[in-house]
Every structure is written in structure tokens, then in C-alpha cells.
Image (cartoon, rainbow, N blue to C red):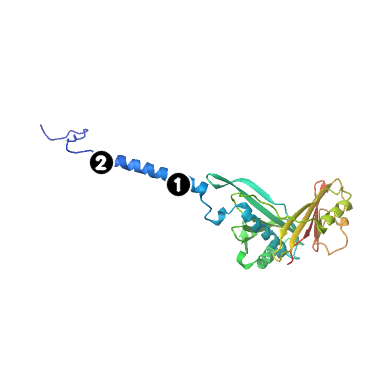
Amino acid sequence: MSGAVHAGYAPPTRPDQPESGRRRLRWLVAATVAWALLLAGLTWWSVRHDPPTVKEQRSLDQAGPVVDRAVGRLTAAVGRDGVPAVLPARVERGCRVTPLDDGVELERGVEVVLAGDDVRELLQRVADRLPADWRAGVSAFDGEPRLRADAGEFVAVEGRAGGPGRVLFTARTGCRPEGAGYRPPTAAAGDEAEEARRALRGWGGAAGPVQVLVAPCPGGDTARTARAETAGVGQASLAAAFGAGAPPVRDTADVYARSGDPAVLAERVDDLIRVAVTTPCPA
């Protein structure tokens, strides 16, 4: 018989030629599958049992105090250049720390009312007064001035315009494991809360609940903002509810703000008047 091979047919395998190529291929496939399963198992075990190895994974209860201290420092950095008021904390759920674990994010902030509308000037002054290791700087973002800084432990600080004559500073943790959760600092209601109640009575409103927001100061003191609101007082003068004090930073039909100890901010929003009375950290 001729040894020629017809087109379209594989040459026959002689009995003395084992299918070593096919065996190697089967072993390679099996080894690859086993290695993939091993990696998946180790990843699952690490996510569930290993402690965090990077600071971004520090839990919310560990990062929360860094945010609180940042808020206090921001009130001190504002000084007499505006009227600061601490904002309520926001805890948002639903972010992803890993593909397997949900996380939470904490944000606290300070709103500041200015005498004018020069947001960049205030941002730069605040940046210059923040600690050197925060590496604070002001640059343009989408044509608007923006302060950026790092308060440590991957807590991001930002300052930007919050409306006409207003600046908003925030400190955020980014997405973190919840851990024991966030517990905001507390302090007994002081003169700020009583001043807020007097303002409500001055507008003829009810002395309703007062929310006291607290942040630790660098020197051991405490920044405090007492917030309250009342409704149904018509077009009552905002300034009339406060006694004599420093000249106002702003005094319009809808906003009254003056610095001092304490600093006061009142604003009309629809049928509500909202008041914030603040003792900031010492500059």
C-alpha cells in the first residue's frame, strides 16, 4: 500500500505512538481550573477573615473622630472672616467596600456666610490656616475655586461655593466598613441653645426642639451649633430677634448673619425661619 495520505484525512496513529499531546492538554486544562478555584477560595477567605491591610478599610467608627476633629479645625480656620455654622452629619449606606461587602460613608460640614461674594479669598485664607500636613490648596475646578485637603486617615476635606455669599466646607470618609458605627460627639446644651430659643420667641414662634451639633477643637475646647426653626411668623424682621452685638455680616429680608461669641445665622426659607447659633473653635 502506498504511504501517501489523502487530503482531508488525518494520518493514522501507530500503536507505538501514545496520544501524549492530548494528555498534556487535558492535564493543562485541569490544572488551570484547579488553580482558578484555589484563587477564588483564597480570595473569599481573605475577604471574610483577614484584617484590613490598607487604611481605606479602617471602619467608620475609627474614621469618624477624624472627621469630627476636621470640622472643629475648619470652624477655627474661618475665624472672623465669616459666620460659620456646623451642619448635621450625613451617613449614607449602599456603597461597596469590596464586591462582597457593603459599606457606609460619613460626611460632616460647616456652612459659612460671607460679607461679600469673594469665595476664593475665603477659601485661600482657610487653606493658609489649616495644618501644614493637610497639604491644603485652592485651585479651579469647572471654572470655580475649590479647596482640597487631606485631614489624615484618608479623610478628604473640600471647600466650595454654596450659593451667593456662602461657602460650604465638608469632611468625608469615603466608603468604609461600618464597624461599630458612627457616634457623633455630644455636649450639654449651653448658651447657644438658649440664644436660639430666645430668637424663636422674638419672632413670635414656639420654642420648639433645638438640635445641638458638636465638634472637638484642637486645643481641647468644643465647637457647638444650636439649630432650630419656626413657622408662621410672616415677614418678621430677622434682625429684631437678636440683641445688640457685632455689626452684621449680612442683613437682608431673607438672611441675617453676624460673627461673635456666639455667631448667629438666621434665614427665611419659604414659610420657615431657621436659626443657627454657633460658638466656633478659637482661631
Q: Residue 10 or 198: which is nearer the viewer?
A: 198
- Give the percent coordinates (x, y) of residue 213: 74, 54
Identified at 86% across, 51% down, the residue is: 200
**Disc 2 + disc 1, Cβ < 8 Å:** no
User: Does the rendering let one see residue 143?
Assistant: no
Marks 2 and 1, Cα distance to the nearest angstrom? Answer: 32 Å
Q: Residue 30 or 83: which is nearer the viewer?
A: 30
Q: Residue 265 or 42: which is nearer the viewer?
A: 42
- Give the percent coordinates (x, y) of residue 63: 62, 55
Identified at 66% across, 53% down, the residue is: 107
Q: Residue furthest top?
A: 1
Identified at 30% across, 41% down, the residue is: 25
- Left or right, residue 206 beside residue 218: right
Callout 2: helix, strand or loop? helix
- Left or right, residue 109 beside residue 252: left
- Give the percent coordinates (x, y) of residue 192: 81, 57
> Mark 1 — residue?
42
> Mark 2 — residue?
21
| Residue type (three-letter) at the residue carrying disc 1 | Leu
